[in-house]
Image (cartoon, rainbow, N blue to C red):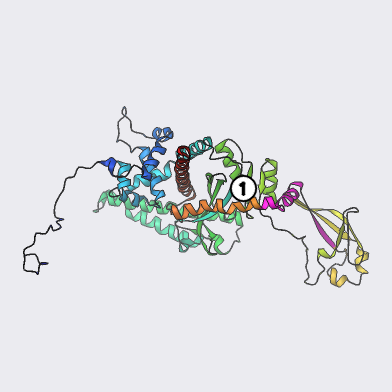
Amino acid sequence: MSPRDTSGNNPLIRYVNRQQMSWQALDVDKLIGEEHPARAIWELVGSLDLTGFYEGIASSAEQGGRPAYDPQMLISLWVYAYSEGIGSAREVARRCGFDPAFRWLTGLQEVNYHTLADFRVQRQQELDELFTQVLAALSKEGWIRLEQVMQDGTKIGALASGRSFQREEGIREHLQRARKRLAEMGDPRNEEASPRVKKAQERARQEKQEQLQRALQELQKLKEQKGAGAAGEQNKVSVSDPEARFMKQSDGGLAPSYNVQISSDAAYGIIVGVEVTQQANDSAQLLPAVERIEERLRRKPQQMVADGSYTTREAIEQMAERGIDFLGSMGREEMPSGATHPRRLPPSAFVFDPESNRFRCPEGKLLSPRGRQHEGPGVIYYRYRAHAEDCFSCSRQAECCPGNQRRGRSVMRREESAAVTAFRKKMASAEAQQQYRRRAHIAEFCHAWIKCKLGLRQFHVRGAIKARAEALWACFTYNLQQWIRLSIVHTAATIS
């Protein structure tokens, strides 16, 4: 009688028996349904030119060697993994053992996570060309028009913690300890432990030593950029990811991150450009974004739209020189006062007469032009000065220019270039404002999809080059998903 049977009867029960081996016939193609996303990904990847990936395989029928994994399978694996919010190579390898979609993609092959991790970051050039292929195909279908492109950046966390940021003294101390441990290891072949384990330990310590050396190099670069007297977080780098930088997050805090620049076509929200930078500020990123789009699609966008962090006079001038319409948000700037005293009369108290090219002070005295004081991109500053005798005899000198002993009061006049003036006039129109408001829901949708749907809130790799590779994988996955969606919509519309 079973321990669970208390009725006194002798029922027939089919109990669970896990202490057995089982042979099963499995139809691999029936692991997933006909409409499963993995099938669409496999077909789309297979329709692309993967020659670059196959050319990188060293083994061949003539030369011999271990057969390589099919690049179409590895690409499809990563695209499907990211589409499911999985970015860990170990997790992808684990899923290949039990998840039906992963098993279908691999044809029941076991794929080592080292292979997956290496493939993700080592084939960046080939992936870049694949990304361009997809853009060319989408452009041919009319789903990329470049009539209007939205530019925006988003901060994605680095694979490093705030505690990993250290000053030069701490890094050198860590480096000295790492060198000492590496020297103490001796010859792994003479150790009693497994040679394979000792070799892995030696490799790990060598990598740590190289990482610390890169941290010192990054620290030197920071000093050259910001000066040897930089303080606070500026003279610290991460010993985990030396190329990461502290950047402001959406919640207002600071965290080790990279700035991911994304250009999205407004027609159907396709990503047409992506880059990863260490610069937290977006002010210098607009022109490089335009150049990336031109390089990939062999034509320039008709209009670029970006927020205030990109809208500088220099950017306005650059877009005008290239014949690209630009919509942005440029704050109103008051004339610089140059005030050195809290009760000093501001420049707004002086009236400018454009016909005579002079200013008139509140007491009716004239300030004449004294040359160009400062010239920058898109703006020129002119200085105007009053006669010293007029100021010295004025009853309001103590209020206007108390510190002047030999010269009269001076003010500055800002004169913007024709391109900046035209930009301000254009952005004052209702039509330009309406177009500018489209930027948020198009550009930020891409960011939300990548972070929420694809799960890329923090990079799974270290270093700017590898981070760019992962960002490219995420954007490539996003575009393939949009391609599948648009194809379904187009097919449904054709049938109806």
Q: Position of residue 268 (x, y in %)?
A: 53, 45
Considering only vertical position in the picture, is 74 above or below 250? above
Which secondary structure lies at badge 1? Answer: helix
**Residue range highlighted in magenta:** 410-433
Instruction: Name, please, the residue furthest toward the top.
Output: 62
Specify whether 411 is left or right of 99.
right
Considering only vertical position in the picture, is 211 above or below 482? below
Considering only vertical position in the picture, is 160 above or below 395? above
The quadrant in which the N terminus is found is: bottom left
Frontmost residue, 272 versus 222 = 272
Q: Position of residue 476 (x, y in %)?
A: 46, 44
Q: Position of residue 320 (x, y in %)?
A: 70, 43
Frontmost residue, 310 versus 183 = 310
Instruction: Inspect the magenta stretch and tell me whether residue 475 lies in it.
Output: no
Instruction: Inspect the magenta stretch and tell me whether residue 413 lies in it.
Output: yes
For the question of whether residue 376 can be seen, the reply is no
- The quarter of the picture where residue 252 lies is bottom right
For the question of whether residue 26 can be seen, the reply is yes
Label 1 packing within 10 angstroms: few (<14), some (14-19), many (20+): many
User: Total number of numbered labels?
Assistant: 1
Specify whether 64 is left or right of 168.
left
Specify whether 207 is left or right of 493.
left
Specify whether 240 is left or right of 335.
left
> What kind of residue is marked 1?
Leu
Q: Which residue is mark 1?
A: 286
Frontmost residue, 310 versus 211 = 310
- Residue at left 60%, top 36%? 299
Q: Position of residue 249 (x, y in %)?
A: 53, 61
Instruction: Name, please, the residue furthest toward the front.
Output: 496
